[in-house]
Image: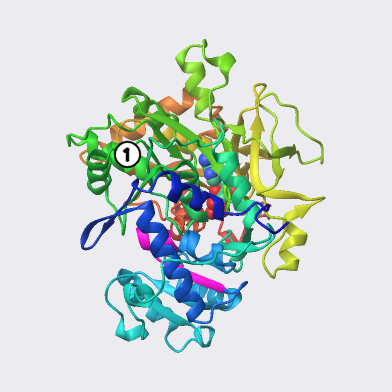
Amino acid sequence: MPGGHAQTLRPFMWRAERLYPDTEIVSRTHEGRTRHTYAEYADRTARLANALDAHGIERGDRVATFCWNNTRHFETYFGVPNTGAQLHTINPLLPDEHIQYIVDDADDEIIFVDPSLAEKIAGAAEGAEEFEGVDFVAMGSEGIDALDAPAYEEFIADHSTEYDWPDLDGDQPAGLCYTSGTTGKPKGVEYTQSMLWSHTMASQTPQGIPMEDSDVVMPVVPMFHVNAWGMPFTATAAGAKHVYPGPSPDPADLAALIEEEGVTVSAGVPTVWLGLREYIEEGNEVDLSTLDTVIIGGAAAPKALVEWYDERDVEVLHAWGMTELSPIGTVSHLKDDLRDADYETQVNKRSKQGLVAPGLEFEVIDEDGEEIPWDGEAFGELRIRGPWVTKEYFKRPEANEEEFVDGWLKTGDVVTVDEDGYMQLVDRTKDVIKSGGEWISSVELENAIMAYDGVSEAAVVGVPHERWQERPVAFVVVAEGVDREELVDRIESGLREEYPKWWLPDAVEFIDEVPKTATGKFSKKDLREQYGDQSLVEGAVPEDDAPDAE
Ligand code: AMP
């Protein structure tokens, strides 16, 4: 429905500019902190749109970014889709061959490159025919010779601060993001204008990840990962102040931004918040008094982490989502009738992945194809649908057949749902450990182990086993100065009290770091490849000879 009646992003930007012209957008950059107002942002975004037109970008063309979180990247968030072009955020942490595949598949016309990532993209582009015809712009005030890229500031400089934003249809593709999955080539997920609009509006409800004009919002989650969970759009809809943490922020950088900019809402994967906790536990003084809410998602938030932030008066909202969901699916708000419950009950609920966001529907289907009861025990695969859930993959009809059934997206997540409606992720269908015909949740064991003092990270994987099919092995990263033997004793005796004997890991191995995927999740695939050798567990068999565990 064109003519200004459709569900599009444009009104969010228009409103912020008109109602909050002086509210700030702050970035941590190599050259220090930059500050712009929404009024300046609107001018610069219009210049960008004019510059794209002058470059020959047309409606439906794909414009890519290869950038960290900063204000210029945020300018592309509205500047590109509001013209009718499609913003493709490339994950720079992917291997070169994935980047080549993605650029080719998306048919990108132009790529905006962060100077600190110039070498990475030049390496991927060198001699690669996938990059033929692609132009580059350097996201800064200086160009990059190796890429023949003009500086962004130069690219937009001579253009008008007025732009005649078109009336777009809700179905107009606005965004594109690739999901890596565990195997095979990355799959593209397109976000239409109306998907992003409805995701923003649902985020803004009290049961989403709501923001107000008094908020100072810092998305630590990368802007190349599902639009930083939509936060730049939601913060703009609210007229909030934005804070972008720039390239590879460490806990000290985040602490400085929180304190000096007065951050009230932030979001990121558990590793980010574990890192900040460790930094503070090491004795660094950080004033968290402005911080109201931390949204943790992308991987399970350990209960111990939720409790640690609770003790410091920072509310953790545990959220679950996927690239295919733009990305928010569930958020762990406390239901009103649980407000009088004891703390332990409340924190157990809040540590689950949460309540389905208003606007979505889901069902959970067990191995017999039946819908599970909501009793917190029965589990099955989660299927979900709704206005901001994709209905298909970009140019991948064969993936559509595998991943969708009767209009539902098959999430690949195995979950329980309790009587209050809280969804809890038991495992990925591919990571669940099948031992003696029963299932062991790797996620649950990991969270249990991560609750022990002295453990920084823990990942549990199934190792093929001649008798039991698979057995769990725990890989643990310890904090400095921890007595490893004593820790293993503590973990083993603790787990023995909590879990049946057959759930206990057959081995606890110490490693320096849990390998991560390009989106910061534990990479079970790499762990298996690196350590899945047979010496760890008595009776284990080489992977190739193992019975098919699927
Ligand atoms: P991606 O599309 O890369 O965002 O990955 C989506 C997957 O990440 C989901 O299907 C889950 O397996 C996992 N995930 C996302 N959020 C959570 C969470 N809060 N707890 C556990 N796993 C999560």
Residue 308, placed above or below residue 13: above
Res. 332 image quadrant? top right
Can residue 471 be seen here?
Answer: no
Which SS class for mark 1?
A: loop
> Pointer 1: what residue?
263
Say left or right for 172 vs 177: right
> What is the x, y in percent for residue 182?
58, 59
Colour scheme of the picture: rainbow
Look at label 1 and name its amino acid: Val
| Quadrant position of the N terminus in the picture | bottom right
Res. 125 image quadrant? bottom left
Q: Nearer the viewer, residue 529 or 376?
A: 376
Magenta residues? 62-75
Residue 447, placed above or below residue 21: above
> What is the x, y in percent for residue 541?
56, 55
Residue plotted at (46% across, 35% down): 447
Residue plotted at (52% across, 35% down): 444
Give yes or no for residue 24 being in the magenta stretch. no
Q: Nearer the viewer, residue 147 or 400?
A: 147
Say left or right for 487 vs 193: left
Say left or right for 154 vs 382: left
Give yes or no for residue 70 being in the magenta stretch. yes
Say left or right for 265 vs 255: right
> What is the x, y in percent for residue 184?
61, 67
Mark 1, residues whose alpha carbon is within 10 Å: few (<14), some, or many (≥20)? many
